[in-house]
Image: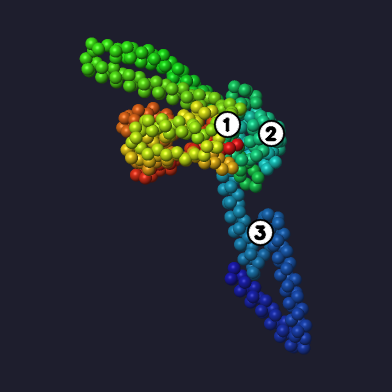
Amino acid sequence: MRYGIKTEARRFSALMLSLVLIGIILELPLELFLLGLCAYLIWFVRKGVAIFRWVEGGMRGKPPFNNGAWIEVIRLLERLSKWQRRSKEKLRFTVKRVRRMTESLDQGMVILNGDLTLDWWNRAAESLLGLRRTDRGSSITNLVRHPDFIKYVSKARFKEPLRIPSGSEPDIWLEFLGSNVGKGEIVIVVSDVTEVDNLERMRKEFLGNVSHELRTPLTVIKGYVETLRDISDFSLATHKALDQIGLQTEKMEALADDLALLSKLESESPPQQLNPIKLKPLLDDIVNDAKRLSAGKHIIKLDCDSQLEFRANSNELRSAFSNIVFNAVHHNPEGASIDIHAAEDANFLSVSIRDDGIGIDLPKIPRITERFYRVDASRNSHSGGTGLGLAIVKHTLNRYNGSLIVSSRIGQGSEFLCKLPRR
């Protein structure tokens, strides 16, 4: 570009100098200088206009000029045009690739405009939702009319997925997961979860049936063990064996009871109408049971206002809180303190169970509410736990839209905070 500008500058300087010399000879130097300047500007502007017309025509054919300052502008425009064409080709290739990928997905994908009208969808969404090409621009709520789905997309707060039956085939269950993108646009991923839902239902039924079927043989075994214990003719070794059978039978009974409770918590919704229960008497009973379990080896304290109330099933709350407190007794050494504190504010009822015992390793905390997960298998085998206690706690709190928050450090103790929303 410097070469073109220098050439144009030399051309302009030569023109102006010639006009000034001629003007001096004719005694009109200023007039000829101004006249030449105006003529040069008109010529220069006409070049620019021609170039702009060439650009507007798509830069087809040869450029209108091939010298001077404008030729450098033309070369720059040509380079920009080539770069733009390459960028368009890359973008077109990327769009085609993304489209091929989305079309190959088993999950449906739908893009909605800010007014919830359909903008784009892939083949899987077309099949799952029964969409047609003519539906573009239609409101999604006119095509998927389930009340829960209408609330889901209207609020546009996609923290959790929504699972509803298909409108065309009630036996098929669909899961919707939304996300806000761009300026008011919404992307919704649709999945057929019928098989997953059936497997989950079968799992829950299996747990319930197993726990129910275990009770009869366990009751028979327990009865025979108690009968055989009364026979004095057996040797000491035989009595020890009977004691072990009895102990293991009791553990199996506890496991069956926990499985039945867990199955109930997963499959049943809490009653809509619940009477408020006083929290202080409930926690007092748990503390008394924990003290008997501890046999004076731990310091157990309760801080709870006598006026605290919560609408829930008292047996379910008792099971949740007692599981945490009894765990603190089982898994902490003699002399450890266990403090239970209950409080409330405008939004939540909070029950904290804190101890200053051995603590839990940080990476293990996210897994402690899993079924049968044991932080320390050897320690739990001696404590006699079923491995379902904290899973029961989590599901109980979930029934009331609550949560369990666990914080702990090795050697400094643990805190289990149960938060239950007031509304």
* Structural crowding at the residue carrying mark 3, measured as other residues with C-alpha within 10 Å and reported as few (<14), some (14–19) or many (≥20): few
Front residue of this view, candidates 182 and 236: 236
Q: Position of residue 191 (x, y in %)?
A: 56, 31
Which residue in the structure is indicated by mark 3? 62
Q: Position of residue 322 (x, y in %)?
A: 44, 32
User: Which circle's residue, 3 or 2, is located before the other in the chain?
Assistant: 3
Q: Position of residue 39 (x, y in %)?
A: 75, 74
Which residue in the structure is indicated by mark 2? 141
Residue under the point 43% across and 15% down: 213
Residue 355 placement, left or right of 236 = right
Q: Looking at numbered disc 2 in the image, what kind of residue is underneath it?
A: Thr
Query: SS at mark 1?
Result: strand
Residue 309 badge: none
Is residue 324 something one can see in this rendering?
yes
Q: CA distance from mark 1 to mark 2?
A: 39 Å
* Structural crowding at the residue carrying mark 2, measured as other residues with C-alpha within 10 Å and reported as few (<14), some (14–19) or many (≥20): some
